[in-house]
Image (cartoon, rainbow, N blue to C red):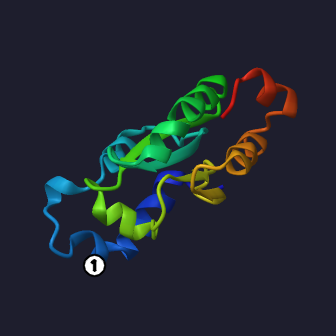
């Protein structure tokens, strides 16, 4: 099994020209520090939620995403990424639509990418986390 931190670091090393083009080191994404600080390989999936303060659809789905993560807190960790503050990361992930949700497994592989605030997208995310339709109905989703 590949070490997830090593996977992410390899991806980021390939993206150094994007990350450092006119960007100070102080603006590097906070999740890098989080990944580097882990002593053992993470076992959780990472859910990147690309959002912005001005994004109305982001605000609409935020409560449902938070409920979904809380119900699955043993298997997924939520990482908020502000579109306006984390430009290098949004460039790296080629974010053009808000909200965008990207779920990666503990090996760093893409599980699902959801662009926009749609009921179908949230249903696909629930399915990717192993939830059933009954849990969706009981979760008072959007």
Near mark 1 (Cα within 10 A), the count class, few <14, some 14-19 or many ≥20, is: few
Quadrant assignment for the N terminus = bottom right
Residue 23: % across, % down: 17, 67
Quadrant assignment for the C terminus = top right
Q: Is residue 120 above or below residue 90?
A: above
- Residue at the spot x=60%, y=38% of the render? 44
Residue nearest the observer in this picture, 98 or 26: 98
Left or right: 97 as drawn, with respect to 127: left
Left or right: 46 as drawn, with respect to 12: right
List the residue tagged with mark 1: 17
Residue nearest the observer in this picture, 105 or 40: 105
- Residue at the spot x=64%, y=30% of the render? 68
SS class of the residue under badge 1? helix
Question: Would you say residue 17 is visible in this rendering?
Answer: yes
Residue 3: % across, % down: 55, 53
- Residue at the spot x=47%, y=52% of the render? 5
């Amino acid at each position: 099994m590949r070490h997830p931190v090593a996977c992410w670091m390899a991806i980021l090393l390939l993206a150094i020209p994007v990350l450092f083009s006119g960007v100070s080191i102080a603006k590097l994404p906070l999740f890098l520090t989080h990944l580097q600080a882990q002593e053992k390989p993470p076992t959780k999936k990472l859910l990147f939620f690309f959002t912005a303060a001005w994004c109305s659809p982001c605000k609409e789905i935020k409560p449902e995403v938070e409920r979904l993560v809380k119900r699955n807190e043993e298997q997924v960790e939520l990482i908020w990424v502000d579109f306006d503050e984390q430009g290098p990361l949004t460039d790296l992930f080629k974010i053009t639509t808000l909200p965008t949700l990207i779920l990666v497994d503990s090996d760093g592989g893409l599980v699902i990418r959801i662009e926009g605030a749609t009921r179908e997208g949230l249903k696909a995310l629930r399915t990717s986390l192993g939830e059933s339709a009954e849990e969706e109905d009981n979760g008072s989703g959007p």
